[in-house]
Structure formats: C-alpha cells, structure tokens
Image: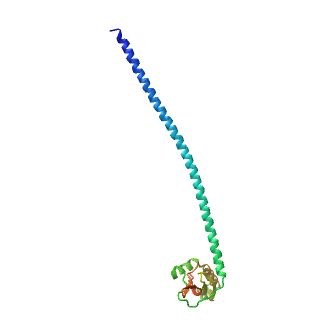
C-alpha cells in the first residue's frame, strides 16, 4: 500500500492539472467568442456611423439648398413688390375723394408718423438770418387706393433747404392705410405741416 501513495498523488495531480487546462481552454474560447462578437459589433457600429455621416452631409446639403431657395424667393418677393408699387404709382387716379368717410392713416397713427418724420428728417443748417422762414413748411400729397404715397408738393414754402428735406421725408414714407368711402378704398389728398426747431 505504501508504494501506491506516490502513484495516486501523481494521478490526482495530473488529473487536477488536466481539469485546470480544460477550464482555461474553455475560458479562452469564451473570451475569443466575446472578442469576435465585439469586433462584429464594432464593425456594425462603424458602418452605422458612416451611414449616419452620409445622412448628415445630405441633410446639410438639403438645408443649404432650402436656405438658398428662401433667399431667392425673398429677393423675388422684394422685386415683385417693387414692380407692383412702381406700376401702382403710375396708374392714373380715377377718383380723388376730397372728404372721405374715413381718412387715410399712417400705420400706427399720428404718434408713429411723428416718430418716422423725426427719425428720417435731415435737418439742414440755417444761418441766423434764415430763422424767420426756416421753421415750418406745408406739404400735400396723395394716398392712393393702394396706400401709396405719391405726388407730394409744397403748398406753403419755408426755407429752400427745409422744403427739400420735407419732400424727401414724405416720399420715403411707407404705405399708408388708404381712405375709405362707401365701403371702398379711395384716393385722397393729405395736407401736412412739418415743423422743426433749430437749436
């Protein structure tokens, strides 16, 4: 029996070593499978990222084309408005109503009109001898049925520099709300005094 002890010890040691090797091989195989799966997932992710990058570039091109189209439409709209306005100003005034039921109005009312005149009027420089005639000028103009300001004239002149600045300011006004008479927009004449207060 004493002779068998070393043999059994070597047998058990060899058997344990074999089990350990098999376990390591199994773990290596599992790790290899996991690495292969990770490589597959990585390849799929790279493919998806490449596809997403392509879609992003395509979307950027679509947005750029859209912005270009909007700019073109905006430019065309401005040009059309200019041509319509020019055409309307050249139309003969069929009926000029002297006393319409509802007067033409500057958009925003009298306060907004005074603010527009104040912000856009170019104040001339006066000599001391000119102060007597510099401070007021009377202008009349027509607001047609489309709201266009046209045919501005000086009805009572002030200083020549004031007259020129006043006409320029009136002609630069935006469209008004036209007068109404018998339920229709009509052309009417507006008379407007412009006062300035030189320093």
**Residue 134, position as x, y percentages in the image:** 60, 86
The residue lying toward the viewer, choosing from 178 and 120, is: 178
Q: Is residue 154 above or below residue 118?
A: below
Residue drawn 59% across the image and 61% down it: 66
Residue drawn 41% across the image and 23% down it: 19
Where, by quadrant of the figure, is residue 125 drawn?
bottom right
What colour-coding does the image apply?
rainbow
Q: Is residue 99 left or right of residue 4?
A: right
The residue lying toward the viewer, choosing from 185 and 199, is: 185
Where, by quadrant of the figure, is residue 149 drawn?
bottom right
Q: Is residue 105 left or right of residue 14?
A: right
Task: Look at the image and tell me in which quarter the C terminus lies.
Answer: bottom right
Residue drawn 58% across the image and 55% down it: 60
Task: Determine if residue 28 is in view.
Answer: yes
**Residue 59, position as x, y percentages in the image:** 57, 55
Q: Residue furthest left?
A: 1
**Residue 14, position as x, y percentages in the image:** 41, 18
**Residue 159, position as x, y percentages in the image:** 63, 86
The residue lying toward the viewer, choosing from 57 and 120, is: 57
Q: Is residue 38 left or right of residue 70?
A: left
Where, by quadrant of the figure, is residue 145 drawn?
bottom right
Task: Look at the image and tell me in which quarter the N terminus lies.
Answer: top left
Q: Is residue 19 above or below residue 93?
A: above
Q: Is residue 10 above or below residue 181?
A: above
User: What is the tally of numbered marks visible in this picture?
Assistant: 0
The residue lying toward the viewer, choosing from 37 and 193, is: 37
């Amino acid at each position: 029996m004493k002779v068998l002890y070393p043999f059994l010890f070597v047998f058990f040691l060899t058997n344990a070593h074999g089990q350990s090797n098999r376990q390591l091989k199994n773990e290596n195989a599992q790790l290899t499978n996991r690495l292969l799966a990770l490589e597959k997932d990585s390849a799929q992710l790279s493919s998806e990222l490449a596809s997403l990058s392509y879609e992003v570039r395509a979307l950027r091109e679509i947005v750029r084309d859209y912005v270009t189209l909007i700019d073109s439409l905006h430019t065309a709209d401005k040009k059309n408005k200019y041509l319509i306005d020019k055409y309307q100003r050249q139309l003969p005034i069929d009926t000029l109503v002297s006393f319409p039921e509802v007067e033409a109005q500057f958009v925003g009312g009298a306060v907004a009109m005074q603010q527009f005149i104040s912000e856009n009027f170019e104040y001339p420089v006066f000599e001391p001898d000119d102060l007597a005639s510099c401070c007021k000028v009377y202008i009349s103009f027509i607001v047609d049925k489309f709201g266009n300001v046209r045919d501005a004239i000086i009805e009572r002149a002030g200083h020549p520099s004031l007259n020129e600045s006043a006409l320029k300011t009136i002609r630069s006004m935006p469209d008004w709300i036209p007068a109404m008479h018998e339920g229709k927009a009509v052309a009417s004449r507006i008379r407007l005094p412009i006062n300035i207060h030189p320093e």
